[in-house]
Image: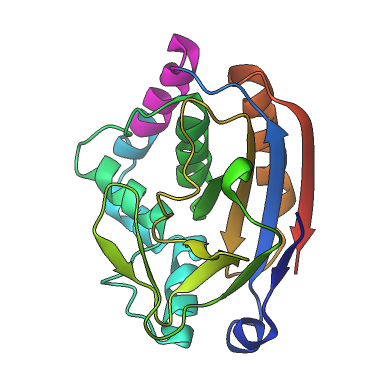
Amino acid sequence: MKLSIDPALKKKCPSVALGLVTAQVRTAESSLQLLGELYSCEAAILKSVDPRALLDAPAISATRTGYRALGKDPARYRGSAEALLRRIISGKHFPNINSVVDIINLVSVESRLPIGLYDLAHVHGDIVFRAGRKGETYKGIGKFDLNLEDLPVFSDAAGPHGSPTSDSERTMVSSSTQRVAAILISFGGAQPLEAWCRRMAALFEKFAEGREIRTEIIT
């Protein structure tokens, strides 16, 4: 599977870069140790002098700027990292889904970067990161149909299946998932991606029996 950035999107968002992590994993309930990492992350956020100030982190601001450049209102269509951070600041816990999804959510909040997560058994061919086209929609995970026009999306041979706002049900990770692609989206440049790819790879190894792990930076 090859991942690339569409030149038209790159022209509007010249600093955009992607961090790709692929891995063989075992999807199961999160261990108490992984849940402890999630709770520690929540506690650190809530103990901040001004937790809401975290919503203006450079990575979150860059995502908002990227959405505006593509013609999408970031107040209506938030990046997933910002949405998760807002959830925690409001006093709610991380959603507890499974070990693989919980790892992605943890790294997303730590890095302030949206992350797409895909079951490679349901991805068809190569993936392109591009702007959504008029009339394109898909059913978001746990959501109604998402209007993809002007939204940054990941699209394979079968059409769009993910975005920094919400991924689709078609490629979502389930209990039967064995191989995944996790894509970190940085609208502020490639500089932070290598470290966060390493962090994700380490968590996959530790909590999801991750193996055959590969990472790549796409600019």
Q: Position of residue 190 (x, y in %)?
A: 71, 63
Assess whether residue 97 is covered by the magenta stretch. no
- Colour scheme shown: rainbow
Q: Is residue 49 above or below residue 186?
A: above
User: Residue sitting at 36 percent across and 39 percent down?
Assistant: 45
How many numbered marks appear?
0
Give me the residue at 43% from left, 54% from top.
167
- Which residues lie in the magenta part? 29-42
In this rendering, the answer to whether 1 lies above or below 69 is above
The answer to whether one can see residue 118 in this image is: yes
Occupied quadrant, residue 168? bottom left
Q: Say left or right for 101 vs 44.
A: right
Q: Give the x, y percent position of residue 39.
A: 37, 24
Q: Quadrant of the N terminus?
A: bottom right
33 left or right of 148? Answer: right
Q: Is residue 14 above or below residue 144?
A: below
> What residue appears at the point 65 percent right and 89 percent down from the top-left corner?
11
Magenta stretch: dominant secondary structure: helix
Question: Percent x, y for residue 154?
Answer: 56, 65
Q: Residue furthest top?
A: 32
The answer to whether 184 appears left or right of 57 in the picture is right
- Residue closer to the observer: 31 or 40: 31
Residue 216 position, x and y percent, is 79, 52
- Asked if residue 50 can be seen in this view, the reply is no
Q: Nearer the viewer, residue 35 or 142?
A: 142
The quadrant of the image that shows the C terminus is bottom right
Q: Kindly identify the residue that appears in the image at 41 percent across and 19 percent down.
A: 35
Q: Quadrant of residue 188?
A: bottom right
